[in-house]
Amino acid sequence: MSAELSPIEKAKFVAAKRASDMVENGMKVGLGTGSTAAWMVRCLGERVRQEGLKIKGVPTSTRTADLAREVGIEVIALDEAGWLDLTIDGADEFDAELNLIKGGGGAHLQEKIVASASDRMVVIADPAKEVAHLGAFPLPVEVIPFGWKTTRKLVEEMLEGMDVLGRDVTIRMNGAMPFVTDEGNHILDLHLLRIGNPRQLALVLNQVPGVVENGLFIDICDTVVIGHGDGRVELRDVAAGSVQQDSMEFAESENLFKDV
Ligand SMILES: O=C[C@H](O)[C@H](O)[C@H](O)COP(=O)(O)O
């Protein structure tokens, strides 16, 4: 890596590097999806090559599985792993309680299953992902292709009774066709602007027939690692029921930037 990296990519990288250092020999690790998680997979691959780190990775998408294999990480399926020590993943938004919106890349279904089957979920993020209220980022909802327009109508009706500021629901497109997830489903993006009660919305959404899973991660994330473009890293941890903050300098950040 190098000097041409933008501050935002450096921020993603230092968060990913810090979180990848939490991985220990022998661990079974959930590997998230997205541009930030891709840095983490590369960092873990570097540790496999340099230190002989022995881990088994459970990817949350075909993209991540391909990258993990490419960088030398042993890849296994979730059902082979059973239970994971740690999952590291990115997010589209996180709030003060470490609740998340995920699924900007359409991978939140597998990501939620994998994170829920882990002792600990660590989210890696750049500072732009932190919000006072979830909802500015459109909330992804995975729906089965059968009758998706009817499902969209049912979701719109359900939103009438919810504490949200916006109610537009769009189908995610891939060119002229609806986007297709790894599970063969489509994604509805809910433009809610501000979600008053994410916990309630997460429960209600999954009761709409045709909905497979929504991108709200409530009480799943244990730690958020926030990277900054100058190499600083902040940690937010859910401990004893509250969120603790910590911050540190990445002393060797310049060298780390050169490593990857
Ligand atoms: O479906 C995609 C995932 O939930 C990603 O982790 C999320 O969209 C964040 O991606 P990025 O790190 O590229 O911002």
Image (cartoon, rainbow, N blue to C red):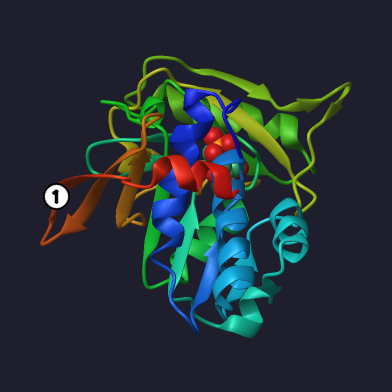
Which one is in front, 225 or 152? 225
**In the figure, 115 relative to 7: above or below?**
below
**In the figure, 237 relative to 57: above or below?**
above
Residue 33 % position (x, y): 61, 49
**In the figure, 192 relative to 238: above or below?**
above
Could you tell me the amino acid type at mark 1?
Answer: Gln
**Quadrant in which the N terminus appears:** top right
Which one is in front, 256 or 55? 256
Dividing the picture into quadrants, the one containing residue 153 is top right
Q: Does dot 1 land on a helix, a strand or a loop?
A: strand
Q: Which residue is mark 1?
A: 244
Which one is in front, 111 or 123? 123
| Count of labels in the image | 1
Q: Pointer 1: residues within 10 angstroms few (<14), some, or many (20+)?
A: few
Residue 6 % position (x, y): 54, 24
The quarter of the rendering in which ligand 1 is drawn is top right
Q: Residue at x 30, y 57 (%)?
A: 222
